Image (cartoon, rainbow, N blue to C red):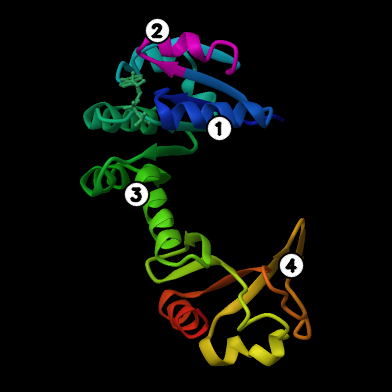
Amino acid sequence: MKKEFAVIGLGRFGGSVCRALSEEGMEVMAMDTDEDKVNQFANTASHAVVGDSTDESVLKSLGIRNFDHVIVAIGDNIQASILTTLILKELGVKYITVKAQNDYHEKVLSKIGADQIVHPERDMGRRIAHNIISNNVLDYLELSDEHSIVEIVANEKLAKKSLIDLDIRAKYGINIVAIKRGRDIIVSPQADEEILMQDILIVIGADTDIDRFEKKVF
Ligand code: ADP
């Protein structure tokens, strides 16, 4: 059975989530207090409704508890975001993702039981900063406070060497989990795989170890 999603708040973030889910062929209900926003999504979402998510009776009448996953993408109005999440929890929604504006907001959301809390601006800011600091780091994904996955472009110090030659697992405690080469991707490369210039190495490990590796190589 197809999963059913509801996106509450159709600003830049919620709108983008709604579009991407619809493009993937998911059933999406889009909701906003602003009629113009709702009209913009009338053809994208499966249903687009004007409504205030802080009004419990509105959410009930939409049968919100039958949705598999509700995304709360209310931006600046932290109070409305918190109240909406609380009502969704009370109504028994299975999985709730909420966009947090700041640490205080996140703390409250986690206390009231939001299943997933996202910080798109903060996370994107960090990713772009990593990319700006090091030209060789293409992308960066934080796994925890101390661990990440990074995409690093191979330079002349890495090229023409095999993973055994580099021995980075022993030297740095990090792992190359995949190599992107043009349109190909080599997942779990063998130890004798030779790295080529411009290969993109997908590296996983502790931030401090990845840092040591980058400083040595770049
Ligand atoms: P972003 O930073 O992602 O662009 P915005 O703050 O611009 O976020 O957008 C948030 C959206 O949430 C707005 O379209 C706003 O009308 C909507 N919104 C705010 N409060 C509610 C509410 N109580 N119920 C439904 N939608 C709401």
Residue 78 visible here: yes
Which numbered disc flags the more N-terminal residue, 1 or 2? 2
Which numbered disc flags the more N-terminal residue, 1 or 4? 1
Q: From the image, state whether disc 1 or disc 2 is nearer to you.
A: 2
Q: Which mark is residue 68?
A: 1
Q: Which residue is mark 2?
A: 35
The amino acid sitting under disc 1 is: Asp
Does the magenta segment cover residue 104?
Answer: no
Which numbered disc flags the more N-terminal residue, 1 or 3? 1
Q: Nearer the viewer, residue 202 or 33?
A: 202
Q: Which residue is mark 4?
A: 187
Q: Secondary structure at mark 2?
A: helix
**Quarter for ligand 1?**
top left
Q: Determine the residue positioned at 45% across, 60% down.
A: 131
Relative to residue 36, is residue 66 depicted above or below? Answer: below
Q: Determine the residue positioned at 28% across, 46% down.
A: 106
The segment highlighted magenta reads: 31-45
Which numbered disc flags the more N-terminal residue, 3 or 2? 2
Q: Secondary structure at mark 4?
A: strand
The amino acid sitting under disc 4 is: Val
Q: From the image, state whether disc 1 or disc 3 is nearer to you.
A: 3
Q: Which residue is mark 3?
A: 122
Which numbered disc flags the more N-terminal residue, 3 or 4? 3
- Estimate the spatial distance between the alpha carbons at disc 1 and disc 4, rounded to whole Å: 32 Å
- Estimate the spatial distance between the alpha carbons at disc 3 and disc 4, rounded to whole Å: 30 Å
Picture quadrant of residue 160: bottom right
Does the magenta segment cover residue 36?
Answer: yes
**Can you give x and y, in whole percent of width and height, for residue 172 in the image?**
52, 87
- Estimate the spatial distance between the alpha carbons at disc 1 and disc 2, rounded to whole Å: 25 Å
